[in-house]
Amino acid sequence: MKFSILRMTLKVVFIIFMLLVMIGPLVGIVIWSFARVWYWPSPLPQEFTLRYWIEVFKQGRVLNSLVLSVTIALLTVAFSTLLAIPAAYGFARYRLPFERILLLLFLMPQAFPQLPVFINLASIFGRMGLRGNIWGIVLAHTMASLVFSLWIITATFKSIPVELEQVAQNLGASRFKVFWTITFPIAIPGIIAGAIYVFLWSMGEFTAAFFIGAPFIQTAPVLMYTSSMGYNLQIASVIAIILIIPSLIFMILIERFLKAEYIASLGG
Amino acid sequence: MRLQTKERFIGFLLVLPAFLVLIFLYVYPLIRAIWTSFLKDNHLTWANYGKVFEIYSRDVLYSVVMTTGVVLVVLVLSILLASYLRFKEWRFLDLMYRLPLFIPFLIVGHAMRIFLAPHGTLNNLLTRILRVEELPGFSRSWIGLLWTFVWVMTPYAALIVLGAFRALDSSYIEAARNLGASKAKVVFTVIMPMCKPSIMVAAILTFVRTISSLTIPVMIGPNTPNMITVDMMFRINFFNDWGVANALGVVSYLIVVVLAVYYLRFMATERGGIKG
Amino acid sequence: MKKFLLILVVVMASIFVFAQSDIPVKVTLTMMVAGDQNMVDFFQYEIAPEFEKLYPNVKIKVVGTGPGDAGSQQIIQQLQLEKDSGKEKWAIDVVVIHETGAVWAIERGLIRQYTDFLTAKRLAIRNTDEMALGVNVDGYVMPMFHSQTALAYNPRFVKDPPKSYAELVEWVKKNPRKFGYNGIKGGMSGVAFVFGWVYWKSKNTDILINGPYDKKYEEDWPQIFAELKEFNKYVTMTAGNAGTLDALNRGEIWMGPVWVDMFYTWMREGRMDPNIRIILLDPGMPGQPMHFAIPTKAANADYALKLIEFVSSPKIQAKYIVERFNWYPAIGDDFVAPYLTKEVLDRIYKDVKQAELLKYGKPMPLLPYKQDMQEAYEKWVEK
């Protein structure tokens, strides 16, 4: 009996510890996002305000940056999905030499340090007039996130039995028609999963957006960074919370697609 | 035979657009990075590397040591976590440890600099509970940096390790348990050796992600010394000095390449081939 | 019938076109602003709406490049890119830069002379519009406001603040780690503190400020910076201009050098403990204005001039710079006084009196000395 009481206390202590360590940092930003006046030694803000949250919905810096981030993320999703579908089909259905190595090559941008590539991309884009331009960021994001859609969609195509296509082809349908009417509809869930990965990654991406876009265009993460560095903690916290929410929701929704290789890079 | 060539050609065409994107937007900038790292005033030279060695050798060392430290702590924690969850279902822990997976690094950096500051939210709470005047703050010090890296890296490593632990055939464990081995002993002598490849993967991925992270060290690292990535950013933003920045980039790449080669060789001996 | 329709369309279209020509063309006025967020906010939320009301065809786009010389550096880089591209019309119409930035820009031919056309120029009474860091900048720049570094302290912990650098050194030894500044990489407040330190210790302070430049006046520097290194042992390093303010607000440090303009912006937004006060240290701390400049080939130079005229006008200086933001005006106090009540004008001199400002407010050193000081700090203090 005594033993189990000890166990219970230990367990409670551990739970509190875990909550403090894991949730604590998030609670901190939530409090800051509502703080107006908060100076030491007060444990909580002396005055609360909704002002910084209202800015999210009002025309202005915060809203602009969020709209910009969503636009960039959607364009990136469109590009990388359009590039990935044919490529994935190629990998899944045609015997390509060095298939494995080629697939691994697409992982390179996520598996190796990204900073050197992005800064050089920035200077290349600078000469082409793509710096400080959303298309520059979209291109960089497409390149780096291609691996998510490519890998997920390749796996999806591979999981669809070839026989399905062969039957239809034997009935006289063209290869393209077979793809369009049979393979593609079955693969839609996989394509969507890939798109969500790409979307989330692009929304949270900082390095490319900073070097290619700033100071002329500020995506939400870049604005969050400059605000946080300038100790505009409220604005930074509001944006931080807004950026966390979609990934939490999506991630719960697509948990079964969670593969270590992919989420590895979500943090950026 | 003809047909097969045609097939291959179609397949090649399908992959081509994606591949071109990779070539132009990834391989080309990378080659340019290496090329620029040898350029100073339009001359080929080692000068940039000389400067890296002269000014930043301490930071390179710091990055490697910090990263290695992170990997060690993360491995210990994730093996502990995975061993516990292997034997026992605990929904609370399962949820908690995975939380950081969903939060972009930049936001983690911001949250931690608020949380770990000398009078940040953590110390605000602790000083009141412990009834002490002052506690040290960890943000902008190596402790805060290590803490944050471990916070974001552990869940991912644990996910890999736990996956491997769970995939392991229970009969081995049962057998060992029947022979009277304690759980701890089973973990050490049976599970861990059998899951060595996955633990290696977890370690290497943690290493790579840590050493290439920019946002976390920028937000909570100390002024000096700091990670290579921060120095690169500084070189570009303050001095507009692309040569040295790229030399630093190449150095960080080389560190990872050495590791990647080691990893591939390890995998080759372990499994008799590369498995993606 | 068809023909008639066609003619009708053409007529309608031409009416439309000619009617349009009377309305001024839509203009996007792009400005790049160095400095902390408070500068960007000032233009985006205060000045832009007012100016756009006055000129409805103009839309102001504000781009902030961050604090310190790095912020100015980014602007210079951007202008240089425009220049190198050989374009006839540059995309940037107005820049707001530090003195260093102004000197760089003039050296590289990136900004033009324009202040002859500026009425407000005659109202600028300090000579900052003529000399910056020992370089003649007359004609190229118009100050937007003046700022000053000062020592902020929290009276809750510091009852009797030090009045001079010498007293500060004593105080710091008694209260280790309670004084914080941001070194020389994270913004100008730390840089200015270091310059003030050198002014205090150097035998040649006047030469550092007024010239001429000669390495022989730097002889005593190794000793000066060695003492600063010793001093740094008792000091907390903060993260940037804003970092010092934040640490003060959160009580992590009790004292630190800050920009007066940022200090008051924070106070106004409620982000600063209202008890905190500022003081100027003897023998003086540097200050500098932020300058307006127009790029050499700015596409909308006419509206740029109008904007600068607008912000420098006594009314706007009074209403925004002094009343709303508590900054020191760019033009003489006498010119803004008619638009203000006495209390408001006095408020900006509440902590630091006008006389003290004149006595202890120093200019930045000559550009080459400034650069040498920054390098000396890296070489002798940081290592």
Image (tube, coloured by chain):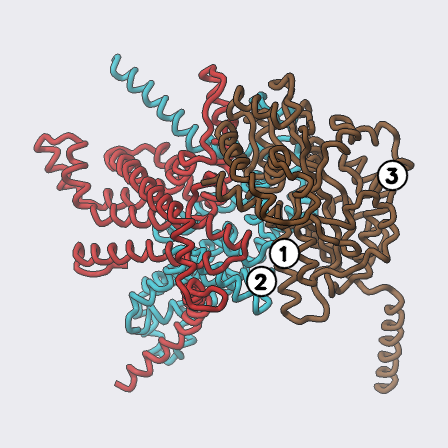
Chain colours: A cyan, B red, C brown
Instruction: Give neighbour class at mark 1: few <14, some 14-19, many 20+ (Cα, 10 Å).
Output: some
Q: Amino acid at mark 1?
A: Phe
Task: Say above or below: C338 vs C2.
Answer: above
Q: Which residue has dot 2 on it? A: A131
Q: Earlier in the sequence, mark 2 or mark 1?
A: 2
Q: For numbered disc 3, what is the local secondary structure?
A: helix
Residue A54 coordinates in the image, percent (x, y): 67, 39
Front one among A209 and A117 = A117
The chain carrying label 2 is A
Q: Estimate the spatial distance between the alpha carbons at disc 3 and disc 2, rounded to whole Å.
A: 42 Å
Front one among A39 and C156 = C156
Q: Amino acid at mark 2?
A: Arg
Same chain for the residues at labels 3 and 2, yes or no?
no
Q: Estimate the spatial distance between the alpha carbons at disc 2 and disc 1, rounded to whole Å.
A: 9 Å
Which of the 4 quarters of the picture holds residue C93?
bottom right
Front one among C124 and C270 = C124
Front one among C139 and B196 = C139
Instruction: Give neighbour class at mark 3: few <14, some 14-19, many 20+ (Cα, 10 Å).
Output: many
Q: Are marks 2 and 1 in contact (CB under 8 Å)?
A: yes
Q: Estimate the spatial distance between the alpha carbons at disc 1 and disc 3, rounded to whole Å.
A: 34 Å
